[in-house]
Amino acid sequence: MFNDASPGTFKKVYIACGRTDLRYGASGLAALVKLKYRLDPYDKGTLFLFCGRRSDRIRGLLWEGDGFLLISKALCNGHFRWPRDSDELRDLSYEQYRLLMSGFTIDRGINPIGIRRKNSTAQTGNL
């Protein structure tokens, strides 16, 4: 679902900058959206994305009209380039969302995920 989103899949996409405790469940994340960011977590079609201390996993919260959908994604290799500088909520365009899910930073859109492959450091000297 994260990678297959096309324009129109989500009405809006927000990311919570900084670090979020990913032990929160759907109701905890919904309370965070409502109390800290002062937005309506029950806005149908709005995806809220959160990243924890380890930037190799994200969690998404989506209200579908009859309940919350809690989505988790953990990368096998690499990490998400997540804005860590503040505790604000940013809305993303479809293009920024696509770049983030493809492993690029959303601030500049040019820094790919650092993926470690076997023997790649021996061959190239880089990660």
Image: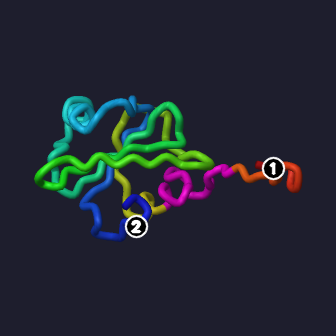
Main secondary-structure element of the magenta-colored stretch: loop
Kindly give the residue lying farthest to the left in the view shown.
66
Residue drawn at 51 percent across, 50 percent down: 107
Decide which of 18, 4 is in the foreground and name it. Answer: 4
The residue type indicated by label 1 comes to: Asn
Q: Which percent across, then down, holds residue 96?
A: 44, 59
Residue drawn at 62 percent across, 49 percent down: 77
Residue linked to disc 1: 126
The residue type indicated by label 2 comes to: Asp
For mark 2, give the secondary structure: loop
Decide which of 35, 54 is in the foreground and name it. Answer: 54
Residue drawn at 53 percent across, 47 percent down: 80
- 127 left or right of 23? right
Near mark 2 (Cα within 10 A), the count class, few <14, some 14-19 or many ≥20, is few
Residue drawn at 40 percent across, 67 percent down: 4
Kindly give the residue lying farthest to the bottom in the view shown.
7
Q: Which residues are magenta?
A: 99-115
Render colour scheme: rainbow
Q: CA distance from mark 2 to mark 1?
A: 30 Å
Foreground label between 2 and 1: 2
**Is 101 one of the magenta-colored residues?**
yes
- Res. 4 mark: 2
- 24 left or right of 2? left
Residue 8 vs 20, above or below: the answer is below
Residue 1 vs 19, above or below: the answer is below
